[in-house]
Amino acid sequence: MTKRIGILTGGGDAPGLNPAIKYIVKKASQVGYETFGITDGWKGLLEPGIEKITDLGSDLQKRLEVSAMELIKNRIHEFEWKDLVKNARLSIAPLSKSDVSKWGKKPGTNLGSSRTNPFAKGNDRSKILIENIEKLGLDYIVALGGEDTQTVGYRLSDLGKNVIGIPKTIDGDLPGTDYTLGFRTAVGVIKKNVEIADGTARSHNQTTVVETMGRHSGLLAYEGAHSTNVGMVLIPEYSPSLEEIKTILMRRKEQGVSYDIILVSEGTKIRDYEDRSSAAKGDEFGHVKFDHVGQLLASDLEDLTDQKIRSISLGHLLRGADPNGYDIDMANHFGVAAVELIEKGISGRMISYSDGKITHVPLSRAIEEIKTVNVEKMYNISGLNSKLIGFDI
Protein backbone atom coordinates (compact mmCIF):
# COMPACT_ATOMS: atom_id res chain seq x y z
CA MET A 1 0.00 0.00 0.00
CA THR A 2 1.36 3.43 -0.98
CA LYS A 3 2.19 5.67 1.95
CA ARG A 4 2.74 9.42 1.90
CA ILE A 5 5.72 10.62 3.92
CA GLY A 6 6.32 14.24 4.89
CA ILE A 7 9.94 15.14 5.65
CA LEU A 8 11.00 18.19 7.67
CA THR A 9 14.10 19.56 9.40
CA GLY A 10 13.78 21.64 12.57
CA GLY A 11 16.05 23.81 14.71
CA GLY A 12 19.55 24.77 13.64
CA ASP A 13 20.94 23.31 10.44
CA ALA A 14 23.70 20.70 10.64
CA PRO A 15 25.98 18.79 8.28
CA GLY A 16 24.28 15.57 7.25
CA LEU A 17 20.70 16.78 6.88
CA ASN A 18 20.68 16.96 3.09
CA PRO A 19 22.15 13.47 2.56
CA ALA A 20 19.69 12.06 5.11
CA ILE A 21 16.80 13.59 3.17
CA LYS A 22 18.23 12.16 -0.03
CA TYR A 23 18.40 8.63 1.35
CA ILE A 24 14.89 8.82 2.82
CA VAL A 25 13.59 9.72 -0.63
CA LYS A 26 15.66 7.04 -2.40
CA LYS A 27 14.61 4.26 -0.05
CA ALA A 28 10.96 5.36 -0.07
CA SER A 29 10.98 5.42 -3.87
CA GLN A 30 12.28 1.84 -3.95
CA VAL A 31 9.29 0.59 -1.97
CA GLY A 32 6.74 2.72 -3.81
CA TYR A 33 6.08 5.43 -1.23
CA GLU A 34 5.46 9.11 -2.00
CA THR A 35 7.74 11.62 -0.30
CA PHE A 36 7.05 15.30 0.32
CA GLY A 37 9.49 17.98 1.44
CA ILE A 38 8.11 20.33 4.08
CA THR A 39 9.90 23.67 4.23
CA ASP A 40 10.89 25.56 7.38
CA GLY A 41 10.33 22.82 9.94
CA TRP A 42 7.05 22.58 11.84
CA LYS A 43 6.14 26.03 10.52
CA GLY A 44 5.63 24.47 7.10
CA LEU A 45 2.84 22.27 8.42
CA LEU A 46 1.20 25.14 10.27
CA GLU A 47 1.29 27.40 7.22
CA PRO A 48 1.17 25.08 4.18
CA GLY A 49 0.53 27.80 1.61
CA ILE A 50 -1.87 30.37 0.28
CA GLU A 51 -5.47 29.34 -0.25
CA LYS A 52 -5.39 30.12 -3.94
CA ILE A 53 -2.27 29.67 -6.02
CA THR A 54 -1.67 32.71 -8.22
CA ASP A 55 1.98 32.89 -9.18
CA LEU A 56 2.65 29.82 -11.31
CA GLY A 57 2.49 31.69 -14.59
CA SER A 58 -0.31 31.77 -17.13
CA ASP A 59 0.26 28.30 -18.56
CA LEU A 60 0.27 26.51 -15.24
CA GLN A 61 -2.27 28.84 -13.70
CA LYS A 62 -4.92 27.80 -16.20
CA ARG A 63 -4.66 24.26 -14.84
CA LEU A 64 -5.13 25.28 -11.23
CA GLU A 65 -8.57 26.09 -9.92
CA VAL A 66 -8.29 24.32 -6.58
CA SER A 67 -7.05 25.26 -3.15
CA ALA A 68 -3.47 24.54 -2.15
CA MET A 69 -4.69 21.78 0.14
CA GLU A 70 -6.57 19.99 -2.64
CA LEU A 71 -3.64 20.39 -4.98
CA ILE A 72 -1.22 18.82 -2.59
CA LYS A 73 -3.56 16.00 -1.68
CA ASN A 74 -4.77 15.02 -5.13
CA ARG A 75 -2.73 16.51 -7.98
CA ILE A 76 0.67 17.26 -6.50
CA HIS A 77 2.73 15.20 -8.94
CA GLU A 78 1.58 17.26 -11.89
CA PHE A 79 4.03 19.96 -10.83
CA GLU A 80 7.69 20.25 -9.89
CA TRP A 81 9.27 21.13 -6.56
CA LYS A 82 10.62 24.43 -7.83
CA ASP A 83 7.24 25.52 -9.19
CA LEU A 84 5.36 24.76 -6.01
CA VAL A 85 7.91 25.97 -3.46
CA LYS A 86 9.67 28.83 -5.22
CA ASN A 87 6.92 30.16 -7.47
CA ALA A 88 3.68 29.22 -5.71
CA ARG A 89 5.20 29.68 -2.25
CA LEU A 90 3.75 26.45 -0.92
CA SER A 91 5.56 24.96 2.05
CA ILE A 92 5.11 21.37 0.92
CA ALA A 93 5.88 19.72 -2.41
CA PRO A 94 6.81 16.29 -3.74
CA LEU A 95 10.42 15.20 -3.58
CA SER A 96 11.59 12.77 -6.25
CA LYS A 97 14.93 11.01 -6.64
CA SER A 98 15.88 13.51 -9.33
CA ASP A 99 15.08 16.44 -7.02
CA VAL A 100 17.46 15.19 -4.33
CA SER A 101 20.10 13.54 -6.52
CA LYS A 102 22.67 16.26 -5.85
CA TRP A 103 21.81 16.87 -2.20
CA GLY A 104 24.11 14.16 -0.84
CA LYS A 105 27.17 16.34 -0.21
CA LYS A 106 25.48 19.67 0.36
CA PRO A 107 25.76 21.52 3.70
CA GLY A 108 22.77 22.86 5.59
CA THR A 109 19.22 21.79 4.77
CA ASN A 110 17.64 22.46 1.39
CA LEU A 111 14.22 22.15 3.05
CA GLY A 112 14.92 25.13 5.27
CA SER A 113 14.32 25.18 8.99
CA SER A 114 12.79 27.18 11.83
CA ARG A 115 12.39 27.11 15.59
CA THR A 116 8.61 27.11 15.41
CA ASN A 117 6.95 25.26 18.29
CA PRO A 118 3.35 24.19 17.55
CA PHE A 119 2.88 23.52 21.27
CA ALA A 120 4.31 26.86 22.44
CA LYS A 121 2.96 28.06 25.75
CA GLY A 122 0.41 30.79 25.09
CA ASN A 123 0.34 29.99 21.37
CA ASP A 124 -0.65 26.33 21.09
CA ARG A 125 -1.38 25.56 17.43
CA SER A 126 -1.25 21.78 17.71
CA LYS A 127 -4.88 21.47 16.56
CA ILE A 128 -3.99 23.27 13.32
CA LEU A 129 -0.94 21.02 12.94
CA ILE A 130 -3.03 17.86 13.20
CA GLU A 131 -5.77 19.18 10.92
CA ASN A 132 -3.24 20.07 8.22
CA ILE A 133 -1.52 16.69 8.38
CA GLU A 134 -4.92 15.07 7.83
CA LYS A 135 -5.95 17.46 5.05
CA LEU A 136 -2.66 16.90 3.27
CA GLY A 137 -3.12 13.14 3.48
CA LEU A 138 0.26 12.51 5.11
CA ASP A 139 0.59 9.06 6.66
CA TYR A 140 3.95 9.67 8.33
CA ILE A 141 6.13 12.59 9.35
CA VAL A 142 9.90 12.07 9.45
CA ALA A 143 11.36 14.84 11.60
CA LEU A 144 15.11 15.46 11.52
CA GLY A 145 16.27 17.52 14.47
CA GLY A 146 17.48 17.81 18.00
CA GLU A 147 15.85 18.06 21.40
CA ASP A 148 13.16 20.59 20.46
CA THR A 149 12.18 18.97 17.16
CA GLN A 150 11.96 15.53 18.76
CA THR A 151 9.91 16.92 21.65
CA VAL A 152 7.30 18.19 19.17
CA GLY A 153 7.47 14.83 17.41
CA TYR A 154 6.86 13.02 20.68
CA ARG A 155 3.86 15.18 21.58
CA LEU A 156 2.42 14.81 18.08
CA SER A 157 2.89 11.04 18.29
CA ASP A 158 1.20 11.04 21.68
CA LEU A 159 -1.82 12.61 19.96
CA GLY A 160 -2.06 9.72 17.54
CA LYS A 161 0.01 10.82 14.53
CA ASN A 162 2.75 8.68 12.99
CA VAL A 163 6.16 10.26 13.57
CA ILE A 164 9.70 8.96 13.08
CA GLY A 165 12.59 11.02 14.42
CA ILE A 166 16.15 11.26 13.11
CA PRO A 167 18.70 12.69 15.58
CA LYS A 168 20.54 15.83 14.53
CA THR A 169 22.61 18.30 16.54
CA ILE A 170 26.22 19.41 16.32
CA ASP A 171 26.21 19.58 20.13
CA GLY A 172 26.03 15.77 20.28
CA ASP A 173 23.91 15.99 23.42
CA LEU A 174 20.65 14.29 22.37
CA PRO A 175 19.79 11.38 24.70
CA GLY A 176 18.83 7.98 23.36
CA THR A 177 21.59 7.78 20.75
CA ASP A 178 25.36 7.58 20.70
CA TYR A 179 25.55 9.79 17.61
CA THR A 180 23.72 12.76 16.16
CA LEU A 181 24.10 14.02 12.59
CA GLY A 182 26.59 16.87 12.28
CA PHE A 183 28.70 16.21 15.36
CA ARG A 184 31.87 14.79 13.75
CA THR A 185 31.88 17.39 10.99
CA ALA A 186 31.60 20.16 13.60
CA VAL A 187 34.51 18.68 15.58
CA GLY A 188 36.51 18.77 12.36
CA VAL A 189 35.66 22.46 11.87
CA ILE A 190 36.97 23.17 15.38
CA LYS A 191 40.18 21.31 14.61
CA LYS A 192 40.74 23.19 11.35
CA ASN A 193 40.08 26.63 12.81
CA VAL A 194 42.10 26.08 15.97
CA GLU A 195 45.04 25.01 13.80
CA ILE A 196 44.68 28.26 11.83
CA ALA A 197 44.44 30.32 15.03
CA ASP A 198 47.42 28.43 16.44
CA GLY A 199 49.72 29.78 13.72
CA THR A 200 48.95 33.41 14.47
CA ALA A 201 48.99 32.89 18.24
CA ARG A 202 52.42 31.27 18.00
CA SER A 203 53.74 34.00 15.74
CA HIS A 204 52.73 36.77 18.14
CA ASN A 205 53.13 34.98 21.49
CA GLN A 206 49.51 35.64 22.26
CA THR A 207 46.57 33.77 23.74
CA THR A 208 43.52 33.20 21.55
CA VAL A 209 40.10 32.36 22.94
CA VAL A 210 38.08 30.26 20.49
CA GLU A 211 34.34 30.08 21.21
CA THR A 212 32.30 27.12 20.02
CA MET A 213 28.62 26.33 20.16
CA GLY A 214 27.25 24.32 23.09
CA ARG A 215 24.41 25.88 25.06
CA HIS A 216 24.02 23.41 27.92
CA SER A 217 26.50 20.67 27.04
CA GLY A 218 30.25 20.93 26.55
CA LEU A 219 30.60 17.72 24.53
CA LEU A 220 31.39 19.53 21.28
CA ALA A 221 34.11 21.72 22.80
CA TYR A 222 35.40 18.78 24.82
CA GLU A 223 35.80 16.53 21.78
CA GLY A 224 37.19 19.46 19.80
CA ALA A 225 39.89 19.89 22.43
CA HIS A 226 40.96 16.28 21.97
CA SER A 227 41.74 16.89 18.33
CA THR A 228 43.68 20.13 18.80
CA ASN A 229 46.49 21.81 20.66
CA VAL A 230 44.61 23.77 23.34
CA GLY A 231 45.73 24.68 26.84
CA MET A 232 42.24 24.90 28.34
CA VAL A 233 38.71 23.89 27.45
CA LEU A 234 35.88 25.63 29.31
CA ILE A 235 32.48 23.95 29.39
CA PRO A 236 28.98 24.64 30.81
CA GLU A 237 29.30 21.72 33.23
CA TYR A 238 31.90 23.55 35.34
CA SER A 239 31.91 27.24 36.26
CA PRO A 240 35.43 28.56 36.81
CA SER A 241 36.29 32.00 38.15
CA LEU A 242 38.39 34.50 36.25
CA GLU A 243 41.04 34.04 38.92
CA GLU A 244 41.21 30.29 38.21
CA ILE A 245 41.64 30.88 34.51
CA LYS A 246 44.21 33.61 35.08
CA THR A 247 46.23 31.46 37.50
CA ILE A 248 46.45 28.56 35.04
CA LEU A 249 47.33 30.88 32.18
CA MET A 250 50.13 32.53 34.18
CA ARG A 251 51.41 29.19 35.43
CA ARG A 252 51.69 27.88 31.89
CA LYS A 253 53.56 31.06 30.95
CA GLU A 254 56.03 30.47 33.78
CA GLN A 255 56.50 26.92 32.54
CA GLY A 256 57.70 28.25 29.20
CA VAL A 257 54.46 28.13 27.19
CA SER A 258 54.83 31.19 24.98
CA TYR A 259 51.30 31.19 23.56
CA ASP A 260 47.98 29.54 24.31
CA ILE A 261 44.61 28.54 22.89
CA ILE A 262 41.55 28.50 25.15
CA LEU A 263 38.53 26.67 23.77
CA VAL A 264 35.26 27.81 25.37
CA SER A 265 31.73 26.56 24.89
CA GLU A 266 29.18 29.37 24.45
CA GLY A 267 27.16 28.24 27.46
CA THR A 268 30.08 28.34 29.90
CA LYS A 269 29.19 30.23 33.05
CA ILE A 270 32.15 32.22 34.39
CA ARG A 271 31.41 32.77 38.08
CA ASP A 272 32.38 36.44 38.00
CA TYR A 273 29.86 37.27 35.29
CA GLU A 274 26.19 38.02 35.72
CA ASP A 275 23.60 36.11 33.71
CA ARG A 276 24.82 36.58 30.13
CA SER A 277 21.61 35.72 28.37
CA SER A 278 20.18 38.48 26.25
CA ALA A 279 17.27 40.46 27.60
CA ALA A 280 15.57 39.94 24.26
CA LYS A 281 12.66 37.52 24.08
CA GLY A 282 13.69 33.91 23.54
CA ASP A 283 12.46 31.64 20.77
CA GLU A 284 9.33 29.51 20.97
CA PHE A 285 11.20 26.82 22.86
CA GLY A 286 12.40 29.29 25.48
CA HIS A 287 16.01 29.55 24.31
CA VAL A 288 17.54 32.99 24.78
CA LYS A 289 20.53 34.37 22.94
CA PHE A 290 23.84 34.43 24.79
CA ASP A 291 26.33 37.25 24.73
CA HIS A 292 29.73 36.12 23.43
CA VAL A 293 31.57 34.68 26.42
CA GLY A 294 34.75 34.43 24.31
CA GLN A 295 34.92 38.18 23.75
CA LEU A 296 34.20 38.96 27.39
CA LEU A 297 36.77 36.48 28.58
CA ALA A 298 39.48 37.71 26.20
CA SER A 299 38.96 41.34 27.24
CA ASP A 300 39.05 40.57 30.97
CA LEU A 301 42.05 38.25 30.75
CA GLU A 302 44.00 40.84 28.80
CA ASP A 303 43.46 43.32 31.65
CA LEU A 304 44.29 40.76 34.34
CA THR A 305 47.41 39.24 32.78
CA ASP A 306 48.89 42.09 30.71
CA GLN A 307 49.12 39.62 27.82
CA LYS A 308 47.87 39.82 24.25
CA ILE A 309 44.49 38.07 24.24
CA ARG A 310 42.35 37.74 21.13
CA SER A 311 39.01 36.02 20.53
CA ILE A 312 37.36 34.13 17.68
CA SER A 313 33.75 32.89 17.59
CA LEU A 314 33.20 29.93 15.28
CA GLY A 315 29.42 30.26 15.58
CA HIS A 316 27.51 29.12 12.53
CA LEU A 317 30.67 27.98 10.75
CA LEU A 318 30.25 24.83 12.82
CA ARG A 319 26.84 24.18 11.29
CA GLY A 320 27.43 25.18 7.71
CA ALA A 321 30.38 22.99 6.69
CA ASP A 322 30.15 20.30 4.04
CA PRO A 323 29.33 17.01 5.80
CA ASN A 324 32.35 14.76 6.15
CA GLY A 325 32.36 11.11 5.10
CA TYR A 326 31.23 9.89 8.50
CA ASP A 327 28.18 12.15 8.60
CA ILE A 328 27.22 11.23 5.04
CA ASP A 329 27.49 7.55 5.93
CA MET A 330 25.41 7.96 9.10
CA ALA A 331 22.86 10.02 7.15
CA ASN A 332 22.52 7.10 4.74
CA HIS A 333 21.90 4.62 7.56
CA PHE A 334 19.52 6.89 9.47
CA GLY A 335 17.46 7.75 6.38
CA VAL A 336 17.10 4.16 5.21
CA ALA A 337 16.27 2.96 8.73
CA ALA A 338 13.47 5.53 9.02
CA VAL A 339 11.76 4.17 5.92
CA GLU A 340 12.26 0.59 7.09
CA LEU A 341 10.34 1.42 10.27
CA ILE A 342 7.55 2.88 8.15
CA GLU A 343 7.48 -0.33 6.08
CA LYS A 344 6.89 -2.25 9.31
CA GLY A 345 4.14 0.12 10.40
CA ILE A 346 6.15 1.33 13.38
CA SER A 347 5.89 4.91 14.63
CA GLY A 348 6.67 7.00 17.70
CA ARG A 349 10.35 6.07 17.47
CA MET A 350 13.64 7.86 16.93
CA ILE A 351 16.40 6.26 14.88
CA SER A 352 19.40 5.65 17.11
CA TYR A 353 23.02 4.59 16.89
CA SER A 354 23.84 2.51 19.96
CA ASP A 355 26.69 0.12 20.76
CA GLY A 356 27.85 0.24 17.16
CA LYS A 357 24.46 -0.62 15.67
CA ILE A 358 21.63 1.26 13.98
CA THR A 359 18.49 0.78 16.06
CA HIS A 360 15.56 2.81 17.33
CA VAL A 361 14.21 4.05 20.65
CA PRO A 362 10.90 5.56 21.80
CA LEU A 363 10.63 9.27 21.04
CA SER A 364 10.20 9.75 24.79
CA ARG A 365 13.92 8.95 25.17
CA ALA A 366 14.79 12.04 23.13
CA ILE A 367 13.19 14.34 25.67
CA GLU A 368 15.06 13.00 28.68
CA GLU A 369 17.93 14.94 30.26
CA ILE A 370 20.54 15.90 27.67
CA LYS A 371 23.98 14.28 27.60
CA THR A 372 26.77 16.30 29.19
CA VAL A 373 30.43 16.02 30.13
CA ASN A 374 30.87 13.99 33.31
CA VAL A 375 33.14 16.40 35.15
CA GLU A 376 34.23 13.89 37.79
CA LYS A 377 35.33 11.28 35.28
CA MET A 378 36.25 13.32 32.22
CA TYR A 379 37.42 16.78 33.33
CA ASN A 380 40.58 18.01 34.98
CA ILE A 381 39.50 20.93 37.16
CA SER A 382 43.03 21.79 38.25
CA GLY A 383 44.05 22.47 34.66
CA LEU A 384 40.63 23.30 33.20
CA ASN A 385 41.14 20.71 30.49
CA SER A 386 40.14 17.16 29.65
CA LYS A 387 41.44 14.13 31.46
CA LEU A 388 43.36 11.46 29.62
CA ILE A 389 41.04 8.50 29.96
CA GLY A 390 40.99 5.11 28.28
CA PHE A 391 38.79 2.08 28.57
CA ASP A 392 36.89 1.55 31.78
CA ILE A 393 38.86 -1.53 32.79
Image: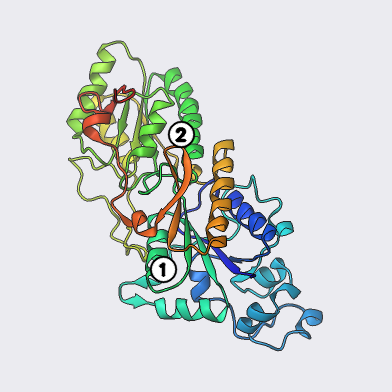
Q: So how many labels did they put on this image?
A: 2
Q: Amino acid at mark 1?
A: Ser
The residue at which mark 2 appears reads as 190
* Residue placed most toward the observer, 42 or 252: 42
The percent coordinates of residue 318 (x first, y second) are 48, 42
Q: Is residue 231 above or below residue 263?
A: above
The percent coordinates of residue 41 (x first, y second) are 50, 64
Residue farthest toward the bottom in the current orientation of the protein: 65
- For the C terminus, give its image quadrant: top left
The residue at which mark 1 appears reads as 157
The percent coordinates of residue 257 (x first, y second) are 33, 14
Q: Amino acid at mark 2?
A: Ile
* Residue placed most toward the observer, 126 or 218: 126
Q: Is residue 383 above or below residue 289?
A: above
Dot 1 alpha-carbon crowd within 10 angstroms: few under 14, some 14 to 19, many 20 or more:
some
Dot 2 alpha-carbon crowd within 10 angstroms: few under 14, some 14 to 19, many 20 or more:
many
Identify the coloring.
rainbow
Q: Is residue 10 left or right of residue 107?
A: left
Say if mark 2 contacts mark 1, CB within 8 Å: no
Q: Is residue 35 above or below residue 267?
A: below
- For the N terminus, give its image quadrant: bottom right
> Which residue lies at the image location 69% right of the left edge and 57% below the top edge?
30
